[in-house]
Amino acid sequence: MSVKCLVSALALSLSIAMPVSAENHHQQATKFKVQQLTENISMLRGKGGNIGLLAGEQGLLMIDDDYRSMSPALKRTLQKFGGEDKLTYIINTHWHGDHTEGNHHFGHHATIVAHDNVRERLLTSQEVKLFNMKTEPYPEHALPSITYQQALTLYINDEEVELLHLAGGHTDGDSVVFFKKANAIHMGDLYFNGFFPFVDIQNGGNVVQMAENVGKVIELINDKTIIIPGHGPVSNKAELKAFKLMLEGTLSEVKAMQEKGMNLGQMQLKGLSSKWQDWTDGFLTTSVWIGILDSSLKKAAH
């Protein structure tokens, strides 16, 4: 499922115009930018979510695989690492299409691994009622064939790759992926570095839980940990802490407005403190983010 479409639909539902940057993020990319993070770990940035790649003698482990339309470009990029035939594992951090549509092509070459809920969602038609959006079931070769409930470890290329399920943040099937020896982590869309994140409330996500889950990750890493976010540039623990503070701070401001009896329109008209202005340079306007915070708080209270 496209983040661009999700965000655009949400904006429409709130009668708010989306910023141009949100559209550009998903339209301009026609190839992948490769950033080497360690001797054998790279980040690939294309049109959708960031891709993590572990390369070695035992093949390639790829985390997420972008939109289906980007598969030809991703195939060309993988040639620098030995080609798509070297793919051993694909990990889907969650079910949205900007992270999983590449399964349709690359699922012919590798075993797909994800949380149980990712397979369940990709097996069936999905609907986001708020956005009036539907996705069709994925074919068998494009589905995760290895799933897990809480944690799973893969051993490949002299690396211990640990998948940990942190539920209810971005979606109900989120995985964070730790490269234990390299001291690196791919957080999927549990982390948008530098801007307000999209949170799929209709499909198990919640900003309140996202903040808690980010806090759990912070406890598991150190100041030297390399962090690959779902969207945005490569990051570190200090920036992740700033993201958590933003989640908590904006939640607190919206909660205070709720307690004063303000409705959504009034809250959007008032806006948030100016200290959060730097976080608007991404997918969401402040008004859309307030709507997500409002819904999250209401759901968390029930």
Image: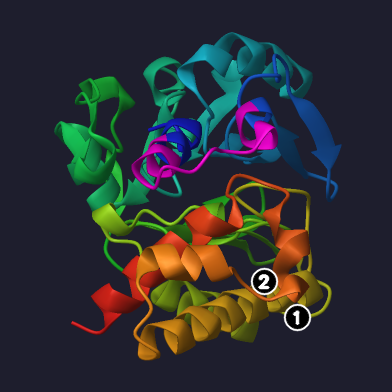
What residue is at 19 percent from the left and 36 percent from the top? 126
Q: Check whether the beta carbons of the residues at disc 2 and disc 1 lie within 8 A of each other.
A: no
Q: Residues within 10 Å of mark 2 (few under 14, many from 20)?
A: many
**Which residues make up the magenta segment?**
9-23
Residue linked to disc 2: 243
User: Which quarter of the figure has residue 36?
Assistant: top right
Q: Indicate the secondary structure of the residue bearing disc 2.
A: helix
What residue is at 83 percent from the left and 73 percent from the top? 224
The foreground one among 295 and 66 is 295
Which numbered disc covers residue 292? none
The foreground one among 76 and 251 is 251
Picture layout, residue 46 above or below residue 16: above
Picture layout, residue 29 above or below residue 180: above
Picture layout, residue 39 above or below residue 140: below
The foreground one among 173 and 12 is 12
Q: Residues within 10 Å of mark 1 (few under 14, many from 20)?
A: some
As shown in the figure, which amino acid type bears the numbered disc 2?
Phe
As shown in the figure, which amino acid type bears the numbered disc 1?
Asn
Q: Is residue 231 left or right of residue 129?
A: right
